[in-house]
Image (cartoon, grey):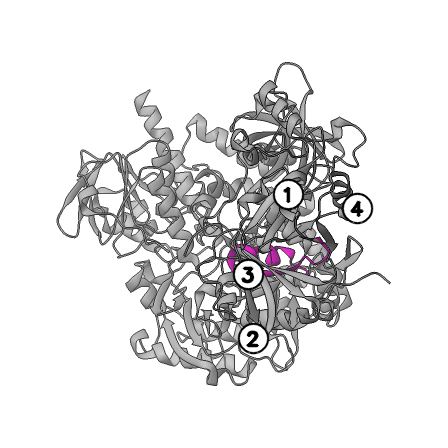
Amino acid sequence: MTLVSSLPSKIMNKYDAIVIGGGHNGLVNAGYLARAGLNTLVLERRPQVGGAAITEELIPGFKFTTFSYALSLIRPDICQELNLPEHGMMTLPMPNHFHPAEDGQYLKLGADSYENYHEISKLSLEDAEAMHDFGYLMDRVCHSLKPLVDMIPPNTQSQDPEELERMAEFHAILEGMPEDVQHMVEKLWTSSISDVLDEYFENDLIKGMLSSSAIIGSMCGPRSKESGMVWLFHKMGEYDGIFGEWGFHKGGNGGFTQCLARAFEAFGGTVMLNAGVDEVLRKDGAAVGVKLSSGEEIYADTVVSALDPRATFLRLVDPDELPQDLVNHIKEFKFQGSASKVNFVLSDIPKHPNHEHTADIFRGFLNVGPTIDYLEEAFADAQDGRFSQRPFIDGCIQSTIDPDMAPPGKHIMSNFIMWTPYHLKDSDWDTERENLGDAVQDTLNSFFPGFNDLVEHREVVTPLDIERVVGIAEGNIFHGELFADQLFFNRPAPGWNQYRTPIKGYYQCGSGTHPGGCVIGAPGKLCSMQILRDREKIMA
Amino acid sequence: MPKTTHFHPRTGLLNHPQIWENWAGYLVAPQYQHSELSEYYSVRNSAGLLDTSPLFKYKFSGPDAETFLMYAMARDIRKCKPGRAQYTIWCDEDGYVVEDGVIMQVTVGEYWLTAAEPNLRYFRQIARKKEFDVQIDDITTAYGILALQGPHSLSILNELTSDLKGIRFFRLAHTQIDGHNVVISRTGYTGDLGYELWIPKDSCVAVWDALMSAGDGHNITPMGLHALKMARIEAGLLLLDIDFSSARFAWTDAQRDTAHELGWGWMFKDLTKDDRDFIGRPAIEAEIANKTSRWKTVGLIIDWNDYQAKHREAGIMPPMDGVFNEGTMNIYKISDIPWEYAGYATCMMYSSLLRSHIAIAKLPLDMCEPGTEVDLEVSIIRRSVNIKARVAKLPFFDPARKTSRE
């Protein structure tokens, strides 16, 4: 893999557009701007682009997906419009998902719906059928809502005729939905995933398995009312048009952001690494450039922040120059990062006592969170200000599919952990880091006896580490919770949900804007549409 | 009982869905696991292992073997030196393509050829008529063939033999795997880095085991015909009975294609320097001189926005995963005249890798410029709908590693 780098000699001091932050949304945004002919510069504070979507060879031969580890929500149109396949984009399918129970039972679901039917019917015949009914409804829900993910949301604070039209479009989408779809959307918007699943399923293991998407990265349990929306958000992802399916990018998610950077450069864009930004320069209420940490100034009429809303509004510019209600809203925007990663080098594939083809079960997601009760117990720890003693784990061993992730015979395992609150009550993360690693390892060892003996190396990444390394406030992987009151009209604040800011020429395109987090690219693309439209208006 | 290949003792156990397809009378696995896409991706990401033994295999030897092949084959066999392989075709007297195949000069004066259909009597009749002193044998069952394809294929083979290092595209090596003699060529039908192994029948199971064991850390994946067919469309490699018909058995010339019409004109770029008399030569020369090709074979990339919009209008999701069609689809000119026929696609699929619906198509010569827009007729809920598509160069996917010299 060639890492994108730019020689300092290529850097000029004036561009059409500057994008602050070379995470995936910054790169998507910059890619579209460069594609439209703008001379565009991406400034990345770290020595490599990718933000939280990076692959690091921390040990020779072993590629760690330190943070982000799988793909689903990335918008299909972005991949096409930025020619990403030409630049090496390759998302490998996950043939199986594995959901172990605490008593040694398990559910293994794969690509054949009848095989899944029989697998689920081991636990409940009705649930096996409910899976089809539920899947059919959810496909129609996601299909109906897809235009909302891919649109610039209406501005509720504006009486502009264009905005009223956008609002009418929004209502037309909602009202055009079949009644059962509408009912389900309302239910997911307002209630817990537990309530939703209770309508369809009876078995606890099945409900546990289906709940996991509702709590990923979020400070809510499956019985919290916020969880329905978090679940729906994840479900909107797709693999080759199948909603809710995931894949591994070749070489990890860092491989994906390298493709984005190559695409951006192919459109004539420039990436500058090791270039942290201290301040967005303003003149007469308009952005005119940026000041780097080195003191260097680079100028552009369009400046885009791909950072989180807190950095965008409270750090890069002087909040005193902004409307007070916006500042208040951003200050109250919930980050409360709650996810960690614990990544391992393993000498072999872990063995499940009741499943002989062990490599199979790690080729997709390993879902450790057997039941809603298990998840709620883990969540209760977090509500008390501790990390879960028996956490939820979303594990995968990409090296079972992608042999370039680890030397032959060895493996690299990524584990996404819930809940690990950024704010610990009686301790701090520098003290607790390895204790968390132990809790995760013990939990895995209980489901896969002998796991401990396979561990050759362990890497623990807490919310504090995410904040320190990637720079996201409180380590929230979505740049702010995906709760209903922080989405669509309100992401990141009412009236400022259309990628603009009160400073002319200063835009926002991070995951803290619509539609939200995950490796999705939509904020980057939609922001570029807004920028290009605004520039056209100025020209006209 | 249907026939099985020499690898069946292994493939029979690995075929998880236990579905079999009939390939030339042999049981072959269309897929080994439910996720055929995982098998497909092994070719692009790690290594896929495919049993292609049902191919018909012929050996040419004797004093006139070269002379015979110079006459019977459209490409000049003299370019295929010992230790090399050559992709070739054979045509009828009118210049229409009979079949294509890979021929290798295994040792000096001995040639092996693979073909999709039986050709023994066809070749022998030519030899008899021209009184060539050539021995033509059917060695189909004497060997099994495995294709090991994908970026890790060389790493796996290097764990088993040291004779492959540096063998170039369309070269071969005689070597041993686990004590068994094999002939390995750097060839394949996937458009990726890959090798094909000719294995004497009694060694087949042992070599399969050796490959699977060496490939364990490289995610070696047994792959079925479906995955192969996906890879070959991306690679722009044509398939008999899908993209063209054998001139021997077609009923009319409308069903026949010339080499130029199939995109194989490159095989004749040195024709003026080539002094051979070969079957079809006068017709091929006339076609070049008089520019009488009726169509060309090109790629098509379906416009995603149009595809999505037309399905959404009909109230359904645009199908992607699993879209694979080997039936003819009509293509129309985009013009004021509705449904103005232009040509047809021979196969269409959703390429997960390229994130596009792609097709192989036959179009009139004036519509073959890459980027030319056409309408492709698809059926959406029982209605014929035209979807915009653009002409593209074949192959769709052509990684540097396929031909790279390491």
First in sequence: mark 3 or mark 1?
3
When the figure is inspected, residue A501 is found, relative to residue A231, above or below; the finding is: above
Q: Which amino acid does label 4 sit on?
A: Arg
Q: What residue type is labelled 1?
A: Thr
Residue carrying label 4: B121
* Chain of the residue that carries numbered disc 2 in the rendered image: A
Q: Residue at x 71, y 66 (%)?
A: B16
What distance separates the C-alpha of mark 1 from that of mark 2?
A: 77 Å
- Front tag of 3 and 2: 3
First in sequence: mark 4 or mark 3?
3
Q: What element carries label 4?
A: helix
Across and down, in percent, residue B7 comes to 70, 67
Residue carrying label 2: A374
Q: What element carries label 3?
A: strand
Residue carrying label 1: B67
Badge 4 vs badge 1, beta-carbon distance below 8 Å:
no
- Front tag of 1 and 2: 1
**Residue B173 tag number:** none
Instruction: Tell me if residue A227 can be seen.
Output: yes
* Chain of the residue that carries numbered disc 3 in the rendered image: B
Q: What residue type is labelled 2?
A: Tyr
Q: In this view, does B225 lie to the left or right of A434?
A: right
Across and down, in percent, residue B172 comes to 54, 57
In the rendered image, residues at marks 2 and 4 fall on the same chain: no
The magenta region covers B32-57
Instruction: Tell me if residue B318 can be seen.
Output: no
What distance separates the C-alpha of mark 4 from that of mark 1?
A: 18 Å
- Front tag of 4 and 1: 1
Q: Residue at x 68, y 62 (%)?
A: B144
Q: Is residue B22 left or right of residue A79?
A: right
**Residue B47 tag number:** 3
